[in-house]
Image (cartoon, rainbow, N blue to C red):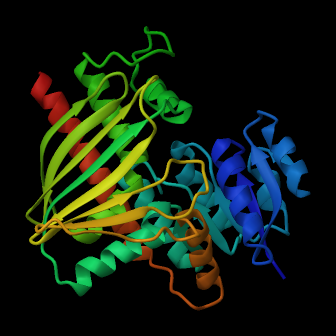
Amino acid sequence: MPHGVGIVGAGPGVAALHLPTLARLHPLFEVVHIADAGSGRAGELAERVGARSSSGITELLDDDRVSIVALCSPPAEHAAQILASVAAGKTAILCEKPLATTLDDAEAVIDACRAAGTALLVGTNHLYDPAWMRAKHHLVAGRHVVRAIAVTLALPPNGRYHDVVTELATPAAAPSRGAPPLHLPEVAASVVRQLLAGLAVHDLPMLRDLAPDLESVVFARAVAPLGYVVGYRASGIPVRLATVMLPDGADALWRLDITTDTDRLEVAFPPAFVHVGSARVRVSTASGVVTTYPIAAEDGYVAEWRALADVLDGDAVIEYDELLDDARYALTLADAAAALIEGAER
């Protein structure tokens, strides 16, 4: 019998990603309830899959058919909704990134899930992408020494991130829409913090695998109209993160570059909100030999739900400590980058 899934959120990520993914994984999972925050979109999406719909989270948590809660809500709501799901006795939670927006909240939700035995998975789909598994195997099997890491993103405007940074970073006297005033140090710092905690977090669990010990943030600044460039050192390895969202620009680019002692590894992830298979992995050696691995049919969205199914079936363990360490890594980096920006501008 399928696990009943209740989805909190009815935005583009639910419509374009989670509903098609769960349909592909039937009969492992079945969407039985979708809740929105009052927009009315839940009803439209629920009708497509024959599910119930509601506004808010209360009715969904009271629905006995829901054993798994998928949290696709704004990041600031994740911690409270995880705690509510645990209190409601739900079996499992798949929380979209980030797990929480503060360290205290991250620790609280992990403690609650651990105490209740609630399965918890954070939807860091890049971490579960088969291409990343292939890249890790290349590094480990070849005993390569990582010398430098870079993550480069060029993205079209995304309403969710725009709303987050303008709501949290724009002074009350300024308009709520439009580009945030990055010339103000407190605004620039808040923008970078929010984007690192909510966007860079897609890739930071992978970077923690390669460079686990944060040492220092070397440089950090906000990039107009919306983005950041951050450099830090971890485990002796220099890491550069660069992101910009442009209204008019080239196709989306999302790439992880790893330079080792003998070669360069490139992992190019597909754009968000599409199902076109895994990322592409390409290895270039110092002698000019280039190896491009085939793209796997399944992407990280499918793989993360399969990972949750493995936990529920008893074939995998719940890695509470890993989830908490991922959150600490991201939030510590975000806080340090924000502090550097504010300190440099004063």
Say whether residue 272 is left or right of residue 340. right
Visible in this render: residue 63? yes
Visible in this render: residue 118? no
Say whether residue 161 is left or right of residue 23. left
**Residue 63, above or below 180:** below
**Residue 145 at what x, y percent from top left?**
12, 74
Figure quadrant of the C terminus:
top left
Residue at x 47% of width, y 72% of height:
130
Residue at x 15% of width, y 36% of height:
340
Residue at x 60% of width, y 51% of height:
274
| Residue found at the very far front of the displayed protein | 288
**Residue 134 at what x, y percent from top left?**
38, 76
Say whether residue 150 is left or right of residue 215. right
Q: Name which quarter of the figure residue 198 lies in.
A: top left
**Residue 162 at what x, y percent from top left?**
48, 28
Residue at x 38% of width, y 38% of height:
154
**Residue 334, above or below 114:** above
Figure quadrant of the N terminus:
bottom right
Q: Name which quarter of the figure residue 190 lies in.
A: top left
**Residue 335 at what x, y percent from top left?**
26, 44
Foreground residue, 110 or 183?
183
Q: How many marks?
A: 0
